[in-house]
Image (cartoon, helix red, strand yellow):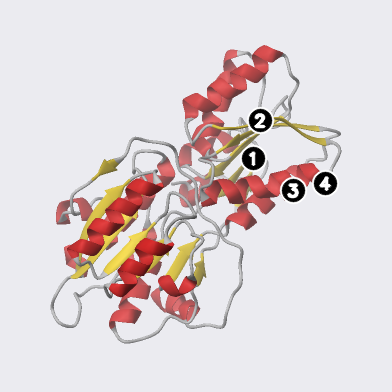
Amino acid sequence: MKKKVLAMLLASAMVFGLTACGSSAADTAEAPAATEEAATEETAEAPAAEETAEAPAASGDLIKVGIINNDPNESGYRTANDKDLKATFCEANGYDASFAYSLKNDEQITAAQKFIQDGVDYLLLSAADTSGWDSVLKDAQDAGIRVILFDRTIDADPSLYEASIVSDMAFEGENTVKWLESQGLDEYNIIHIQGVMGSAAQKGRSGALDAKVAENDNWNIVTQQTAEWNAETAQQIVQSVIDAGTPFNVIYAENDDMAKGAVAALDKANISHGVGKDVIIIGFDCNKWALQELLDQNWNFDQQCNPFQSSYINDVIQTLESGGTIAEKTIVMDEKGFDATTITAEDVEKYGI
């Protein structure tokens, strides 16, 4: 895998409109530097984390990294993502890593400023919002700190970061809408439950659906509201539509947790859902439990969002540490969607996070 990724890094240019993967709202938390114990947890769910550097930097010093991420407890996706990062960026692999968590841009920027003051070698960032990062990234650059984006892109001058390891969120939305179109409904009456507004994940997942609705008279948005990745809020949104008596036949939820909350409202109202039932259920992220819902045909479609970015980041760092250059700013991970009528138990085990 490492050779393959390094080849990708040095290959010819790829151009994508990219965003990143979803998560759920949670209270801000800041964690201390990752310990060796935390970094050596069981990582069978994250095979990418196994492909890491085996030795510290050539000087014998640990590479100091500051990692800014969303709350690891917010969702299965983010838990897997955080676990993967901690398994890779540990002392055994030549790193001294500190972690900070928030879903708020201003708090993430404050954390970035602290890492800059601490003199980290690399700043790894999964941004809460796509905007507002130019100034602090310029400060990092002036301090000789290299920035690597993961999971989410930002609207900033590409010269301010070394690389961006992301999902193609525009593809995720387009792939999901293409699948929905293939269902051939006479009329699409959609409850659209959005993630945190302004996040790269929300923009990508909403964009494809918004475009399709604008182009087709038989595609209708019954309600379009943010649940900020939260299952309980999603349940309340769907319950309000049910209480109003407004007809609907599709729930397009921008992560699995919100799809789960939506289904809870349907179950409470005895409304059938899944394959051959009254309401089509769509989620994103491919949590293992969500893929099991597809296998049981209670849901209809789930779009993968790959949380295992650490080996890609590690390869970028090792290339830079060895004096190499990164030919491509954007590294895109392969992802796929799963249909309840074709998914297998092997898919659930292989792709579920």
Residues at marks 4 and 2, CA–CA distance in whole angstroms: 26 Å
* Label 2–label 1 contact, CB within 8 A: yes
Return the disc, 2 or 1, that comes first in the chain's sequence: 2
Please indicate, yes or no, whether residue 181 appears anywhere in the rendered image: no
- Is there CB contact under 8 Å for labels 3 and 4? yes
Q: Which mark is residue 211?
A: 3
Q: Give the answer, above or below, for where 45 lies relative to 156.
A: above
| Mark closer to the chain start, 1 or 3 | 3
Q: Secondary structure at mark 2?
A: loop
Q: Is disc 3 in contact with disc 2, using a CB cutoff of under 8 Å?
A: no
Secondary structure of residue under mark 4: helix
In this figure, what is the number of numbered marks? 4
Residue matched to label 2: 274
Q: Amino acid at mark 1?
A: Ala
Image position of 323 (left or right of 233): left
1 lies above or below 167: below
Q: Nearer the viewer, mark 3 or mark 2?
A: 3
**Cα–Cα gap, marks 4 and 1:** 27 Å
Say which of marks 4 and 2 sits in front. Answer: 4
CA distance separating discs 1 and 3:
25 Å
Q: Nearer the viewer, residue 120 or 116?
A: 116
Please state which of the two labelled residues, at mark 4 or mark 1, is closer to the viewer: 4
User: Which residue is identified by label 4?
Assistant: 215
Lateral position of residue 234 relative to residue 117, left or right:
right
Circle 1 residue: 340
